[in-house]
Amino acid sequence: LVARVDLKADRQAGVLRVQSAHGERRIDVGSVSQQLATELSYMAAWMGLDRVEVGDRGDLAEALRAAP
């Protein structure tokens, strides 16, 4: 495991909310955030949600918000 996320499915809004995102020590933040963003998009689609929104808690949150 290289990261931990606290997720909430807001079904009324159609949003998978990332309430916090924390990376483990010595990770490549850019690579991990890009791959995590992709997986979160897959998860949102699998759950029937329209999009992913990332909050501001955790040392990975900013990079995850900026990931394509």
Image (spheres, rainbow, N blue to C red):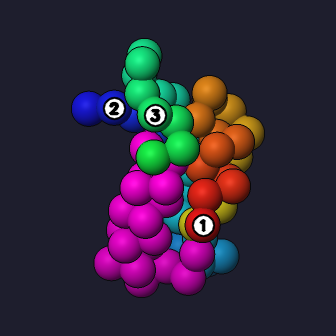
Earlier in the chain: of badge 2 and badge 3, it is 2
Look at the image and say whether residue 9 sits in the magenta stretch: no
Which corner quadrant of the image does residue 4 belong to?
top left
Marks 3 and 1, the one that precedes in the sequence: 3
Residue neighbourhood size for the residue with mark 1, other residues' Cα within 10 Å, grouped as few (<14), some (14–19), many (≥20)? few
Cα gap from disc 2 to disc 1, whole angstroms: 19 Å
Quadrant housing the C terminus:
bottom right
- Is residue 9 in view from this perspective? no
Q: Is residue 21 above or below residue 43?
A: above
* Residue that badge 3 annotates: 28
Mark 2 → mark 3, Cα distance in angstroms: 9 Å
**Residue position for label 1:** 68
Note whether 41 is above or below 31 in the view shown.
Answer: below
Which of 46/59 is in front?
59
Residue 34 placement (x, y as % from top left): 49, 55
Q: Helix, strand or loop at disc 3?
A: loop
Tag 3 and tag 1, C-beta contact below 8 Å: no
The residue wearing badge 2 is 2
